[in-house]
């Protein structure tokens, strides 16, 4: 199982981080399987970072082997979605970027990919018109809609599959909307997809 993630896939989020360039292709990065955090287990803020940000995203689960997938067939390659958090050590990321160095360590550290309960894609009329949100201590902290993606889910799958063979159980984090921010010890995070709570855990 591998975790594939899309960066800078919502225009307003790009603005809040100061990214002004318009990408012609999806920005892709990877997280190792050791980044996975599931089953409501707590997230422990790592000692090496002074600012770990939440980034709430729709996560897609791949359900069949695929390579060089055409966009029109991409919908056949995933069967379930959930809400996830792409935790980012923002201070490390800034430092790596200033050096012109790769920033995988700021994204791929242990437990940095939290996921909720998966629900079948079949229960939604339009996967590209789904609302999702994150509540922190019962207050809405971030919300978005997949209709605002710069690169749609099927196009992401088609693009990635040119370079990387997709396998059953692979996860794709599809990007975060505007409103990211830091987490702190004791906070209660809950993620919702169309008002259904799929993600529920604490920060330690």
Image (tube, rainbow, N blue to C red):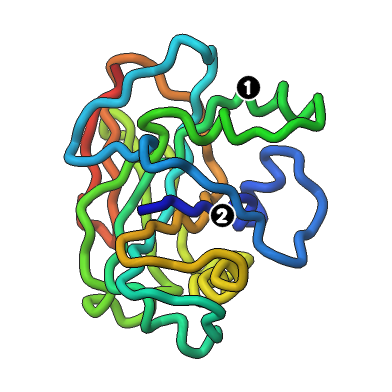
The numbered mark, 2 or 1, whose residue comes first in the sequence reads 2
- Residue 45's x, y, as percent? 39, 18
Q: Which residue is mark 2?
A: 6
| Contact, mark 2 vs mark 1 (Cβ under 8 Å) | no
Q: Is residue 10 above or below residue 179?
A: below
**In the displayed image of the protein, which residue is found farthest to the left?**
39
| Disc marking residue 162 | none
| Disc marking residue 92 | 1
The residue under the point 53% across, 12% down is 50
- Residue 165's x, y, as percent? 49, 68
**In the displayed image of the protein, which residue is found farthest to the bottom?**
72
Which quadrant: the C terminus?
top left
Element under disc 2: strand
The residue under the point 33% across, 75% down is 64
- Residue 11's x, y, as percent? 66, 56
Give residue 77's quadrant in the image. Answer: bottom left
- In the rendered structure, the answer to whether residue 1 lies left or right of residue 176 reads left
Q: Is residue 55 above or below residue 96?
A: below
* Residue nearer the viewer, 79 or 10: 79
Category of crowding for the residue at label 1, using alpha-carbon neighbours closer than 10 angstroms: few (below 14), some (14–19), many (at least 20): many
Category of crowding for the residue at label 2, using alpha-carbon neighbours closer than 10 angstroms: few (below 14), some (14–19), many (at least 20): some
Q: Is residue 139 above or below residue 20?
A: above
The residue under the point 36% across, 35% down is 34
- In the rendered structure, the answer to whether residue 3 lies left or right of residue 38 reads right
* Residue nearer the viewer, 34 or 37: 34
**In the displayed image of the protein, which residue is found farthest to the top?**
47
Element under disc 1: helix
């Amino acid at each position: 199982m591998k975790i594939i993630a899309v960066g800078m896939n919502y225009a307003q989020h790009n603005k809040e981080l100061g990214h002004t360039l318009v990408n012609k292709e999806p920005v892709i990065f990877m997280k190792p399987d050791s980044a996975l955090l599931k089953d409501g287990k707590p997230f422990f803020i790592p000692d090496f970072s002074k600012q770990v940000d939440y980034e709430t995203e729709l996560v897609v689960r791949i359900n069949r082997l695929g390579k060089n997938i055409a966009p029109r067939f991409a919908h056949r390659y995933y069967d379930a979605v959930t809400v996830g958090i792409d935790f980012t050590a923002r201070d490390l990321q800034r430092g790596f970027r200033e050096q012109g160095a790769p920033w995988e360590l700021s994204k791929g550290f242990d437990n940095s990919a939290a996921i909720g309960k998966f629900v079948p894609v079949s229960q939604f009329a339009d996967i590209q018109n789904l609302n999702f949100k994150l509540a922190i201590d019962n207050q809405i902290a971030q919300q978005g809609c997949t209709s605002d993606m710069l690169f749609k889910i099927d196009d992401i799958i088609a693009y990635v599959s040119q370079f990387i063979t997709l396998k059953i159980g692979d996860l794709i984090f599809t990007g975060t909307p505007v409103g990211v921010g830091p987490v702190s010890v004791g906070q209660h995070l809950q993620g919702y997809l169309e008002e259904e709570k799929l993600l529920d855990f604490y920060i330690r």
